[in-house]
Image: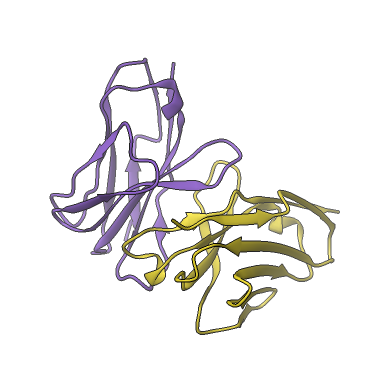
Chain colours: A purple, B yellow
Amino acid sequence: NAGVTQTPKFRILKIGQSMTLQCTQDMNHNYMYWYRQDPGMGLKLIYYSVGAGITDKGEVPNGYNVSRSTTEDFPLRLELAAPSQTSVYFCASTRIEDQPQHFGDGTRLSIL
Amino acid sequence: GENVEQHPSTLSVQEGDSAVIKCTYSDSASNYFPWYKQELGKRPQLIIDIRSNVGEKKDQRIAVTLNKTAKHFSLHITETQPEDSAVYFCAASYSGGGADGLTFGKGTHLIIQP
């Protein structure tokens, strides 16, 4: 099993550009999450999904959108990139509620 | 929503000594408390977790204690080794980190001095 796979690993965007961060898991997990981690800080929840077709906002959803058309994939979209979105983005998943979350390797995003 | 405070932000200990990191949480409904270790440029990795029906859990040199009344939990690392140097994050959630995700502390940079 590959676990949670995120692409790309690194990306530089210009202000106002858009992009999609990809996340896929091969563990048949129902629950998936997007977090962002700013330098020297803990992770903050952006969006989460409890299953295909169901998504909901976390603590810091502004400027982002998500979709969950399949169990495996949970892409995160930035529509109008802003410097404040410079961060490391982690995707995570878990099978059921009371099990630990598995994290991907992250996407390091810089917006200039 | 949940708020998690973590202390200290930096902890330096001599190799072989013990290290203790403390966290407090605000939501009494939280019932799942994991600890993650993150090395520079890497993903967070779970090292131990505890649920609210347990007061203490141990795994070799690592232990976690939970005081539900005071709403705080702590990570204890004994016989520290150079490879323990990393940033450690505590987190809390309701329903085991499922539907609502984890709320993280700001992290503790643990430095093991040789």
Residue B46, horizontal then vertical, whole percent: 52, 63
Residue B17, horizontal then vertical, whole percent: 84, 66
Q: Quadrant of the N terminus of chain B?
A: bottom left
Q: Does B29 sit above or below residue A92?
A: below
Residue at position x 29%, y 22% in the image: A80
Q: Is residue B28 left or right of residue A104?
A: right
Residue A98, horizontal then vertical, whole percent: 38, 73
Residue at position x 64%, y 55% in the image: B6
Q: Between residues B79 and A61, which one lies in front from this camera angle?
A: A61
Residue at position x 33%, y 52% in the image: A33
Q: Is residue B101 left or right of residue A57?
A: right
Q: Between residues B62 and A56, which one lies in front from this camera angle?
A: A56
In the figure, residue A106 lies in which quadrant?
Answer: top left
Q: Is residue A42 left or right of residue A93?
A: right
Q: Between residues B5 and B109, which one lies in front from this camera angle?
A: B5
What count of labels does the image hold? 0
Q: Quadrant of the C terminus of chain B?
A: bottom right
In the figure, residue A82 lies in which quadrant?
Answer: top left
